[in-house]
Image (spheres, rainbow, N blue to C red):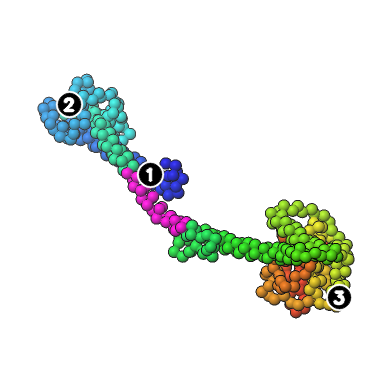
Amino acid sequence: MSDRAHSLAWRLGLAFALVCSVVLAGVALFLYRSLIAEIAYRDDLALLGRLEQVRALLHDSDSLGALQQRPGLYQNMLGNQESVLWVRRADGSTVIEINPHAQLLPSVAPIAIDQPPQRADIHVHDAALVLSGRALGPAGEQLTVLVGKRLAEREAILASYRLRLYLGVATGALLALGIGLLLVRRALAPLQDIALAVAQIDLRNLHKRLPSNAVPAELQAPIQALNGMLTRLDQGFERLSQFSADLAHEIRTPLHNLLGSTGQALNQPRTAAEYRELLGSNIEEYERLNRMVENLLFLARADHGQRPVNLQAIDLAWLGDEMCDYFQALAEDRGATLQHSLNGTLQTDLQLLQRALANLLANAVRHALPGTAVQLRCHYLDDTACISVCNQGPAIAAEHLDKLFDRFFRIDPSRAEPGDSGGLGLAIVRSIMTLLGGTVTVVSDARGTCFTLALPRPAEPLER
């Protein structure tokens, strides 16, 4: 029973049966009331006509005695055992009485002779219809006529009809339930196909997609949504697999260097200077591993929103001076210069913005051509502050632009230098911009490469 309670087919089938039952019950009630009204109308007309017939018969007869001797005539005129006829004189004596079931006849005010009987003149008494009226007998004698009809036959007919309606509605409800379940299960058959198709998708075949042809239109949107989810899962799994491979490669290199240098040092005695040189080389590898771990921890916290954002008003001109002073020595070693034209204020997190700009400036200085200037500039749109870091250097191929912000991605892995971010610098920049509610874009051509940070504009007006 619990399975049926949670079954969509049973719920829809019961709902279909309930709707059909309500409709059938409404139709049955309408037909039943229509039958009651029709039978009542016919009985009333028959009773009105009977009174007129008796009036005419009494008026046209030669004598009341002759009428009293012909009871079969009245019984034939009445037509069944449910009818009643009673004719009385003015003194209360009975002229004619036909009452097969000894029906109690009430005292009903008769209608006048010249008044035609109406349905409103009919009374209901003791499960019988009664109509009374004045009549003229032979020689103008005043008579009172009472005609009636017992309702037992009508009630029996209606009771039989009600029973048939009950059976009809119940049978219709059961048929509706059965047909509804059949139709719903056939309609839900594509869901079973979708479930089977989804069950066959695992880590080895995430490239598979659910078929969207030959399915109902109502299932097109869910199937498209599921296919979109599978595409995102496939891409995410590929990125995760690539990330794991890149991480293993990045960690293997310093570990291999550490093991190799340490193994060589243990093969034979070394001088104190050689040991110091070995330890210094090992420290560089440890620092490289430490930076990699710190960067990965920062990315993990940023991706999960665990790094709080401390908003404050930042003087961009001061920030530009600080960044240029910090990277001045590195730029001089590369034969490049630093320039900035930052101005105005920005409401954002200072440490995060400094880290993003530091990663971009380190890359820009490292790839700038000697004798060129690395520029740090900004401009403002309606609701966005854009800070750009541009350098003149080799253009980045178009096929690499979309991958620049992937973790551990390097255009030329062989050009890794000591002190670099291990291929995580630009990935950190993108995570920082996500935390700050902004975006990072890159444009590269023969004139140089330019990274742009787009941040929400502060509430107060920015200086131009």
Asked where in the image residue 245 lies, by quadrant, the reply is bottom right
Please state which amino acid type lies under the numbered disc 3. Answer: Gly
Mark-to-mark CA distance, 1 and 2: 52 Å
Visible in this render: residue 430?
Answer: no
Across and down, in percent, residue 222 comes to 52, 58
Q: Secondary structure at mark 1?
A: helix
Read off the residue under disc 2.
96
| Mark toward the start of the polypeptide (3 vs 1) | 1
Q: Report whether 438 appears left or right of 90.
A: right
Q: Quadrant of the C terminus?
A: bottom right
Please state which amino acid type lies under the numbered disc 2. Answer: Ile
Read off the residue under disc 3.
335
Across and down, in percent, residue 198 comes to 49, 58
Q: Residue furthest bottom?
A: 446
Indicate yes or no whether the magenta region holds residue 87: no
Across and down, in percent, residue 341 comes to 86, 68
Name the residue at 38% across, 44% down: 21
Mark carried by residue 21 = 1
Mark 3 residue crowding within 10 angstroms, few (<14) / some (14–19) / many (20+): some
Q: Are marks 3 and 1 in contact (CB under 8 Å)?
A: no
Asked where in the image residue 270 lies, by quadrant, the reply is bottom right
Mark 1 residue crowding within 10 angstroms, few (<14) / some (14–19) / many (20+): many
Q: Which residues are magenta?
A: 171-196
Viewer-closest of 445 and 293: 293
Visible in this render: residue 157?
Answer: yes
